[in-house]
Amino acid sequence: MATKPADKRVSSRIAIDAPAVLSWRDEKMVGYVELVNLGGMYVASEKYPEVGEYIDLILSLPGDPRAFRVRASIVHIDPVGSNRRPGFGARFERPPVALLDAIRDLGRSH
């Protein structure tokens, strides 16, 4: 029996709507983190890198005044925005421990 993607996640998704500064290659823009978990996030944005590319993000989580810098790799794109705004899914690459702790705290409060 095949496993569902949700069964492979390292933690539950948390719905947020947090602005983030995105940069890759020569692009720099603002997107919105709609979902986050300990493994990565879904970011709504008008433009997005190709699957497999790396992106640098600066984001803050709701209720936390800190800004976190994190690098992520693009794992899927959703140009149509099937059940959400168009954007992309990204997996964290060596995220800061403080970001992971903040996501855990956010999960406890949701």
Image (cartoon, helix red, strand yellow):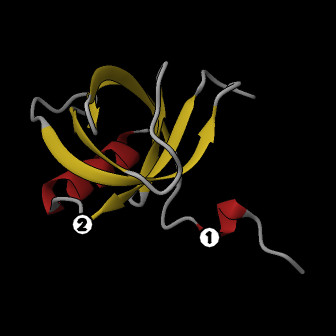
Query: Quick one: 47 or 106, which is closer to the camera?
Result: 47
| Residue with the most extreme front position | 26
**Residue at which label 2 appears:** 94
Q: What residue is rendered at 14% in x and 55% in y?
A: 98
Q: What residue is rendered at 67% in x and 68% in y?
A: 7
Q: Which mark is residue 8?
A: 1
Vertical relation: 4 (above or below) 61: below
Left or right: residue 84 versus residue 62 is right
Query: Quick one: 64 or 19, which is closer to the camera?
Result: 19
Q: Residues within 10 Å of mark 2 (few under 14, many from 20)?
A: few
Amino acid type at image mark 1: Lys
Left or right: residue 50 versus residue 32 is right
Q: What residue is rendered at 44% in x and 38% in y?
A: 110
Query: Quick one: 34 or 21, which is closer to the camera?
Result: 21
Amino acid type at image mark 2: Arg
Quadrant for the N terminus in the image = bottom right
Nearer to us: label 1 or label 2: 2
Q: What residue is rendered at 15% in x and 42% in y?
A: 68
